[in-house]
Image: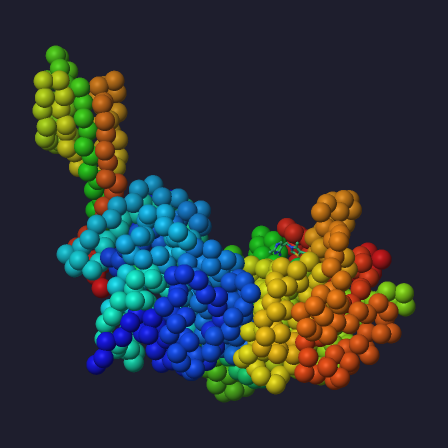
């Protein structure tokens, strides 16, 4: 076996893992690594303009494909810039391997130039992290990193590599498999528990299925769809779970939670059996846990992560296991079961809630309603684009009005709520899905948090369509100030906004401004048809004070929704 | 409720801070924490004394298990177990106090392990409340210094925490 440098070993490991793209930014401590990248062409490096975007792009690469995303950054400021990206991925359980440079082992602890304790800084926002002090540990550590990131409940893993380790030499031996005595994620659900769950489901009079991001991450959308149709139960999917069940289907009630539909929230609140799948009863979903628990209902909870179960809400039938396997076993058992309760009364009640038409909004001739833009976007892209969103009102409107029929089309920061992810997400998804339309829905605040990535998109010729719902406000915060702070719009007015059209043009892209409702559709067509191969920045001036409804105010119960028509 | 949680941990650098960090990040309380390598040098054994409702203790156990470096976790308080803590206490021991201090150390089955004209260092083991009671029993004004290790715990009988 020939001797290889640490840098060669890292690149070889990436090749062994069949990594196609890595997103990164060079610097002093990763010079050896970048030199090795230069000498080969199997692993393609995408140069971003800010390390945060490198991690977001790798994250979106993973979200849209299920493969492990990889980012590479230098030590010190490169590493700290990556932290927001890592924390964002962690909150949404996205498998990443982030390779950070570190000062030489001999300098660690000396306050060396561009030194920071990356392992310490990221401890609370990674699934695991490593500092590799010896080149002989490098290959096996990277193997562990990929394994840990992708298995069990996925998550980001940081591998911090000192510069001298990338220069030191040893033999390369990449283990084909790895076992860790301290890490054995449970895969198979307990069959007794599954049987118990099936009995509860078969006997339910007012059942609801509530599924989340775990269904997307574990590729369980097909199983979930089969199970739901077999049962004929109403289903609601969280923000992270959108696309896990067809959004246009009759059994689908929309999203639950703070900006969920009336039918989804009322069904969650009033059901007698709740089947929760790959989801975590997050505060944005169930709002006040005491109010939620005050209603007697049986809860079945399927999740790969035992610590998600009975964390915020007591569960009657916990099932720890890989979601698709558990669902398939449920299907097998249910197909054998003949007895089924008639739930038509429950459906009638749900249809009553649905008849409220809580997502109806009043169109205007004089101003563009943001909801209208998303509806048109859905039509023109036939509901099949990959839609990356930023964070704010535009994110909620996209979740409400873009009906995702398939998984891995909807990319957004649900857990951390990171403004700025939109454009880098669109970039990562573009590399992962060449030829597929990729949209970035954003706001005038969020887009400016990673606007520099317009340059990356130009460099790689990515035909992203940016839909900027420009309300000249930090809309989501302004909405709270309107509703709960007597309209004191403290620091939420966006003054001195750039001319986004000119800005897009300055980066070498196409910019289109849209100011009238009648121009929305033609502008979208122009972007998606005439400029199919260009990045188009649609700066859409929307109704300034449009609000997201329904809304469950913080701390309230799920049935205490504020509806649009009560607020007109 | 007070619980004694025993953890087998990979003896890796940084592993202990993951455990300690978990408690602070999630707002769990730590009364004492002890750690040292086991007979197998690749493993450390921790004993953590904490308190909380059943739900919180369940979460603590689950969250500990979730740490990649954690090999095994048990709640010792679920069954019969033994707990011990070591205290070294330096006291003033001159004049009439000298005899009295020796007498108290004997009553508590302590050992005097360092002696000067004016001071003793007494070594005492027992559960936490025995050590507390010793401190209560002697004249507080005579205490110069105390060092306590925190609780170490082990299950009784056949109950073994091993890989
Ligand atoms: C990095 C970051 N900083 C602050 C916030 C708080 N925040 C949530 S939504 C929002 C406003 C977003 O404004 P904009 O992007 O214009 O979207 P809009 O709500 O107007 O659609 C802010 C400031 C956040 N989520 N992320």
On the rendered structure, is A455 left or right of A475?
Answer: left
Residue A174 visible, this angle: yes
- Where on the picture, by quarter, is residue A182? bottom left
Who is closer to the viewer here, A273 or A43? A43
Residue A345 visible? The answer is no
- Tell me the residue at 39%/66% (across/down): A31
Q: x, y (%) of residue A15? A: 38, 80
**Quarter holding the N terminus of chain A?**
bottom left
- Which of A96 and A245 lies nearest the eye of the viewer? A96
- Compared to A305, does A243 lie above or below? below
Tally of numbered discs: 0
Residue B111 image offset from top left, x and y in percent: 10, 31
Q: Where A105 falls versus A211 (above or below)? A: above
Q: In the rendered view, does A503 fall on the left or right side of A324?
A: right
Q: Residue at x 72, y 45 (%)?
A: A490
In the image as oriented, which residue stretches furthest toward the top?
A: B95
Q: Left or right: where does residue A447 sit relative to residue A7?
A: right
Along the line of sight, the residue nearer the viewer: A111 or A521: A111
Measured as percent of width and height from the top left, residue A159 is found at 37, 64
Q: Please tell me in which quarter of the rendered image ligand 1 is found.
A: bottom right
- Residue plotted at (58% across, 57% down): A283
At 77% from the left and 60% from the top, the residue drawn is: A471
Would you place residue A493 above or below residue A265 in this image? above
Report the side of A392 relative to A416 (left or right). right
Q: Nearer the viewer, residue A269 or B49?
A: B49
**Which corner quadrant of the image does residue A298 belong to?**
bottom right
């Amino acid at each position: 076996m020939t001797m290889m440098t640490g840098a060669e070993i890292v690149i070889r490991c990436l090749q062994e893992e069949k990594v196609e793209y890595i997103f990164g930014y060079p610097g002093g401590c990763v010079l050896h690594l970048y030199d090795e990248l230069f000498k080969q062409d199997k692993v393609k490096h995408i140069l971003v303009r800010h390390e945060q975007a490198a991690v977001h792009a790798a994250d979106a690469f993973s979200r849209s494909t299920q493969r492990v995303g990889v980012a590479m950054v230098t030590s010190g400021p490169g590493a700290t810039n990556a932290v927001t990206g890592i924390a964002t991925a962690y909150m949404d359980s996205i498998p990443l391997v982030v390779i950070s440079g570190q000062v030489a082992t001999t300098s660690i602890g000396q306050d060396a130039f561009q030194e920071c304790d990356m392992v310490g800084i990221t401890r609370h926002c990674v699934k695991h992290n490593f500092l590799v002090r010896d080149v002989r540990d490098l290959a096996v550590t990277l193997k562990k990193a990929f394994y840990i990131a992708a298995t069990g409940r996925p998550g980001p893993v940081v591998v911090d590599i000192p510069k001298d380790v990338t220069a030191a030499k040893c033999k390369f031996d990449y283990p084909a498999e790895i076992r860790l005595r301290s890490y054995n994620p449970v895969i198979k659900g307990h069959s007794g528990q599954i049987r118990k769950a099936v009995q509860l489901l078969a006997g339910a009079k007012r059942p609801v299925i509530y599924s989340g991001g775990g269904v997307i991450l574990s590729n369980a959308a097909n199983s979930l769809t089969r199970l739901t149709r077999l049962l004929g139960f109403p289903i609601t999917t969280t923000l992270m779970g959108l696309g896990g069940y067809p959004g246009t289907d009759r059994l689908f009630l929309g999203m639950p939670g703070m900006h969920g539909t009336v039918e989804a929230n009322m069904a969650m609140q009033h059901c007698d059996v709740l089947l929760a799948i790959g989801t975590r009863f997050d505060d944005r979903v169930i709002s006040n846990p005491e109010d939620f628990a005050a209603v007697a209902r049986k809860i079945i909870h399927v999740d790969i992560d035992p610590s998600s179960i009975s964390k915020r809400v007591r569960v009657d039938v916990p099932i720890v296991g890989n979601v698709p396997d558990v669902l398939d076993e449920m299907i097998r058992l249910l197909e054998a079961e003949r007895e089924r309760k008639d739930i038509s009364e429950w459906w009638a009640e749900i249809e009553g809630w649905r008849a409220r038409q809580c997502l109806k909004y009043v169109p205007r001739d004089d101003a563009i309603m943001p909801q209208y833009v998303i509806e048109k976007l859905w039509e023109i892209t036939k509901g099949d684009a990959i839609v990356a969103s930023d964070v704010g009102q535009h994110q909620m409107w996209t979740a409400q009005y873009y009906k995702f029929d398939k998984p891995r089309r909807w990319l957004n920061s649900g857990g951390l709520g990171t403004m700025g992810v939109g454009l880098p997400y669109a970039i990562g998804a573009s590399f992962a899905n060449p030829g597929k339309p990729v949209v970035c829905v954003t706001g005038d605040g969020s887009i400016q948090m990673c606007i520099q990535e317009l340059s990356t998109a130009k460099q790689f010729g990515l035909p992203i369509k940016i839909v900027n719902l420009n309300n000249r406000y930090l809309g989501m915060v302004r909405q709270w100030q309107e509703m709960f702070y007597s309209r004191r719009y403290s620091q939420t007015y966006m003054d001195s906004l750039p001319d986004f059209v000119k800005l897009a043009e300055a980066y070498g892209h196409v910019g289109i401004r849209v100011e009238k409702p009648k121009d929305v559709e033609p502008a979208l067509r122009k972007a998606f048809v005439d400029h199919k191969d260009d990045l188009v920045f649609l700066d859409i001036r929307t109704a300034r004070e449009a609000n997201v409804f329904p809304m469950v105010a913080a701390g309230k119960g799920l049935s205490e929704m504020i509806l649009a028509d009560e607020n007109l | 409720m007070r619980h004694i949680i025993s953890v087998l941990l990979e003896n890796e650098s940084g592993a202990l801070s993951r455990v300690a960090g978990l408690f602070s990040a999630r707002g769990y309380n730590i009364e004492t924490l002890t750690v040292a390598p086991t007979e197998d040098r690749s493993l450390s054994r921790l004993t953590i004394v904490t308190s909380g409702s059943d739900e919180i203790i369940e979460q603590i156990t689950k969250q500990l298990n979730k740490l990649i470096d954690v090999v095994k976790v048990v709640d010792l308080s679920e069954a019969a177990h033994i707990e011990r803590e070591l205290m070294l206490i330096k006291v003033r021991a001159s004049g009439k106090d000298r005899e009295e201090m020796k007498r108290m150390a004997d009553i508590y089955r302590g050992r005097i392990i360092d002696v000067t004209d004016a001071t003793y260092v007494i070594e005492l083991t027992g559960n936490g409340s025995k050590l507390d009671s010793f401190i209560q029993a002697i004249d507080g004004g005579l205490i110069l210094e105390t060092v306590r290790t925190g609780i170490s715990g082990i299950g009784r009988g056949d109950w073994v925490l091993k890989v």
